[in-house]
Structures are given as structure tokens and as C-alpha cells.
Image (cartoon, rainbow, N blue to C red):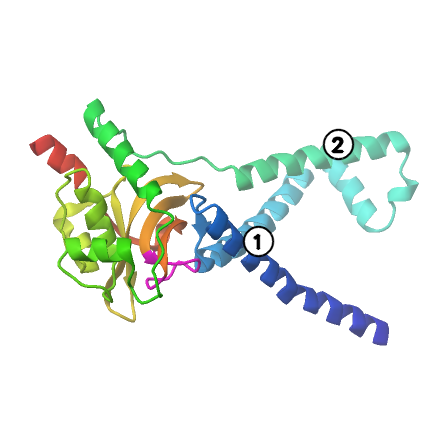
Amino acid sequence: MKSKIAYLKQELFSIPVFFLIVEGCRALIAHFSPETPLFDPASEFETFLVKVWQFTWLSMACWLILKLVFPKLHKYAVYMLNDGFEKIPLKQKRYITLAIYITFLFGLILLFNGAKAKPRNASTHQTETELRKHLIVYLKSQLYVREKTGNNDGIEVEKYLAYVGHKKGAPWCAAFCSYAYAQLNIPNPKTAWSPAWALTKDRTTKYLPGDCFTLYYPNLKRVGHVGIITGETHGYYTTIEGNTGNSGSREGSGVFTFKRDKRKVFAITNYISRWYHES
């Protein structure tokens, strides 16, 4: 009994150790490779829980498929679970092993490589497409920007804030987006007030790289953060955001790139297409 308890303690001790290793790796990636999108921790944990749930129902579905489509294989599987595998002839063992491998292989392919949604077509006008590409190039060039003392200050940060009429010390996620758009002469709300980036008249249901996204915070009862979408991957928007950090919070130390859960996005706003077609 004591040996089992000691073993359990070792297993439990490995959890915080593993957590520290993961967080250490995140910090190293953010420092040495800031162009690599990171999950914000909440989305990362939710993704883990969703994958566990998907794996659970997928395993149950595979078991049902075995019973309905491969009844002989299902019979062998039940037999194996009752410690009868060693009594099965070698030829049948090979068949069982291969069949189970193929079944779960297809299951895992469905689980981890679901159909990838595509953004709506970028304008057939090459100019708008190129404009969006140039915007993203500029955004990526800002990924090394960090606050000087962690108080919404620093040469670059103060430059973003000055563009929208604020001094150092003010939150600057919206100022960052505004300044980035201004570098390509794209009209925008030109404000540090993030709710102004989620107005109904500017919203779109489908994104293009270079469009803005906003996050709603129940504790604030309003939109509290804004960033720019650069693409998407496996159900997540890849983004570049100012005034955030490794944790993906709305108050951070610099410009970072993230993978944001689509379900957490409050609104997507498109300023580029309207301006391009009106100009």
C-alpha cells in the first residue's frame, strides 16, 4: 500500500514539473522566436479538454464500428481484454493488430486534421491583396517591440499612443492597430478606445488577413482588447496584438502573436475593403 502511495506522489509531482517545463518553453519561444504564434493559456487549456472529449467519443465510435462492421475483430478485442491475447494464433494476432491500427489511424486523422475553413476570397483586385500583405509584413516587423518599464511606455509604444493623441501610460492595443493601419494610409477609428473597433457598421462575418478582431470582457461589460488577424489554423485565428504578453492578457509588455479561439472573438471588423473600393 505504501509503495502505491509513494508512486502516486511521484505522478502528482510530475504535473507541476511538466507545467513549469511547458511555461518555460513558451517563454523561450516568445523571446527567441516572437514570430511564432502562441495559444493564450485559456484557449490552450480549453483545446486540451476538447481534444480529450473528442478522443473519448472517437474511441467509443471506433469500438462501435468494430462491433458493427468487423464483428469478428470485435470478438477478438473482447477476448484480448480478458487476457486471452496470448492464446490467439500468431497469424490472427497480426490481423488484429493491423485492423486496430488502421481503425484508430483513421480516427486520429479525423480528430486532428479536420477540414480547415478558408477565409473568403481576397479581392480579385491585386491591389487590395497586396495592401493586406504589406500590412502583415509591417505587423511582423513590430513583434520585437517591448515596453521599457512595463508601464505602457517605450519609444515605439509612445509613438503608437501619440498617433491617437495619448501619452505614455495609457493602454495601447487599439493605438497599435491604428498606427499600423496608418503606415499604409488605411482609414481607421484612430482611437485608443477598443470598443470603437467593434462598431456594427464595420463588422463582417468572414475575415480577410489584415482585418481586426475584438474580445469582450464580462467584468468590464464591454470590448476590452483589439488586435489584427493574420490568418487561421485548425479553428484558430492567428493574430498580432499590442499591449499583451505570453498569457494573452489585455495588459502586457509588448507586441505578440497568438492563436485565438474563434469562439472567443466578439467581432471582426473590415476597414480595408471599404476604403479600397470607395477610393
> Is residue 244 rendered magenta in the image?
yes
Is 191 displayed left or right of 215 in the figure?
Answer: left
Q: Residue at x 78, y 35 (%)?
A: 96
Name the residue carrying label 1.
Answer: 52
Residue ranking furthest to the bottom: 2
Q: Residue at x 54, y 50 (%)?
A: 51
Count neighbours of disc 1 (C-alpha within 10 A) and say few if under 14, some if 14 to 19, many if 20 or more: few
Q: Position of residue 165 (x, y in %)?
A: 13, 59
Q: Residue at x 40, y 49 (%)?
A: 258
Q: Is residue 261 above or below residue 18?
A: above
Near-viewer residue (251 or 270):
251
Bounds of the magenta segment: 243-252
Type of amino acid at the residue the image marks with label 1: Val
Q: Is residue 231 above or below residue 268?
A: above
* Quarter-of-image position of residue 107: top right
Q: Is residue 154 above or below residue 271?
A: below
Name the residue carrying label 2.
Answer: 98
Is 279 displayed left or right of 25 in the figure?
Answer: left
Q: Earlier in the sequence, mark 1 or mark 2?
A: 1
Type of amino acid at the residue the image marks with label 2: Leu
- Badge 1 marks a residue whose secondary structure is helix
Near-viewer residue (1 or 189):
189
> Is residue 210 rendered magenta in the image?
no
Name the mark nearer the viewer: 1 or 2. Answer: 1
